[in-house]
Image (cartoon, helix red, strand yellow):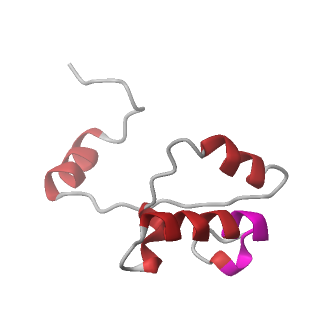
Amino acid sequence: MDVDDPATWPRPLADLIYTIVDEVELDEPDLYVDLELEGREAQVLDLLRDHLLRAQHCTRLLDHEADAIRALGLRPPGRRSR
């Protein structure tokens, strides 16, 4: 399944997301990516069980962040330089 393409989602998951969208009355239905799923996490996880889910995350670094990586390299999360 492609997280960016609801047509590839398991039908019960897509139905749940569309129901939530209807409940919150979004002006822009494409904003499903910003839905609050509080209280529905277990239901969503149950619907995803036994499905392969691949995702990637990209972010833009600020100039000072890129400079720090060039100067110091990447560090594991939770470790602070002294």
Determine the residue positioned at 14% across, 51% down.
64
Q: Residue at point 67% right, 41% down?
A: 42
In the picture, which quadrant includes the C terminus? top left
Q: Is residue 9 magenta?
A: yes
Side (left or right) of 75 relative to 29 = left
Instruction: Say if 19 sits above or below 7 in the image.
Output: above
Task: Report the side of 70 relative to 18 (left or right).
Answer: left
Q: Is residue 18 left or right of residue 28?
A: right
Quarter of the figure with residue 59: bottom left
- Where's residue 69, x and y in %? 28, 46
Residue 51 position in % (x across, y down):
81, 57
* Residue that appears at 67% across and 51% down: 44
Name the residue rendered at 69%, 80% in the picture. 7
Q: Nearer the viewer, residue 14 or 60?
A: 14
Q: Is residue 6 above or below residue 46?
A: below
Say which of 77 and 51 sits in front. Answer: 51
Residue 6 percent across, percent down from the top left: 64, 76
Q: Is residue 37 above or below residue 79?
A: below
Residue range corresponding to the magenta coloring: 7-14
Which quadrant would residue 2 be assigned to in this image?
Answer: bottom right
Q: Of helix, strand and loop, which mostly describes the magenta segment?
A: helix
Give 28 or 65, whichever is nearer the viewer. Answer: 28
- Position of 57 with respect to 69 (left or right) is right
Task: Name the quarter where the N terminus is drawn.
Answer: bottom right
Please, which residue is most extreme toward the top here? Answer: 82
The answer to which of 73 and 14 lies nearer the viewer is 14
**Residue 55: x and y, percent?**
60, 60
